[in-house]
Image (cartoon, rainbow, N blue to C red):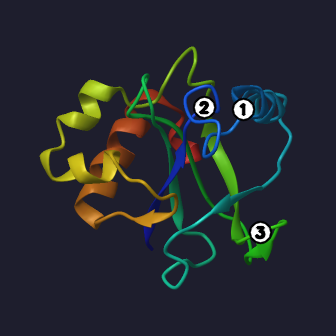
Amino acid sequence: MNSFLVTFKPSTESAERGWPIEELQRMVKRHKSGEHFAEPWRFANQKDVSLGDRVFALRQGKAGPAIFGYGSIAGAPARHGGPLRFPVEFGVIVDPENEVLITREELLAIPEGRKYWRAQSSGILLPRSIARRARRSCGAQTATSAFP
């Protein structure tokens, strides 16, 4: 099973490449209400993605890097008015304006991970050693049932 890093940067920090924080907050509210859904996410690495692969959501920008979500690939890719996007269903997702699963300090303590936390693309394949450490860190702070 592969693990990928998808990225989020608020549109307030990057109007061209960012995403409105309000959209992400709506997604968090849907998840907290118990709704099951998959959010289409852009992946730079499309050839290595399979159903069920793990996905970590990375907050970038001034408040990052930080992990604020964990989930898995929930289906086949589809076009959503642009490039192919893979559906991601989050087992755990929090509002990165208020909390995170893995802090900046914890991420930067993974020496081999530093280049990944500065990724310019979403949907990059993580080495197994980094994914294992990230999964352990997330698991220490969330319900273990969310982690396949």
Q: Quadrant of residue 110?
A: top left
Q: Which residue corresponds to mark 3?
A: 82
Label placed on residue 10: 2
Alpha-carbon neighbours of circle 2 within 10 Å: few (<14), some, or many (≥20)?
A: many
Sequence order check, earlier mark of 2 and 3: 2
Q: Which residue corresponds to mark 1?
A: 20
Please, what secondary structure does the residue beneath circle 2 have? loop
Counting from the top left corner in percent of width and height, residue 53 is at: 54, 68
Residue 20 relative to residue 97: left or right: right
- In the picture as drawn, the residue positioned furthest to the front comes out as 16
Sequence order check, earlier mark of 1 and 2: 2
Vertical comparison of 129 with 144: above or below: below
Q: Residue at x 60, y 46 (%)?
A: 17
Residue type, label 2: Pro
Counting from the top left corner in percent of width and height, residue 20 is at: 72, 32
Quadrant containing the N terminus in the rendered view: bottom left
Please, what secondary structure does the residue beneath circle 1 have? loop
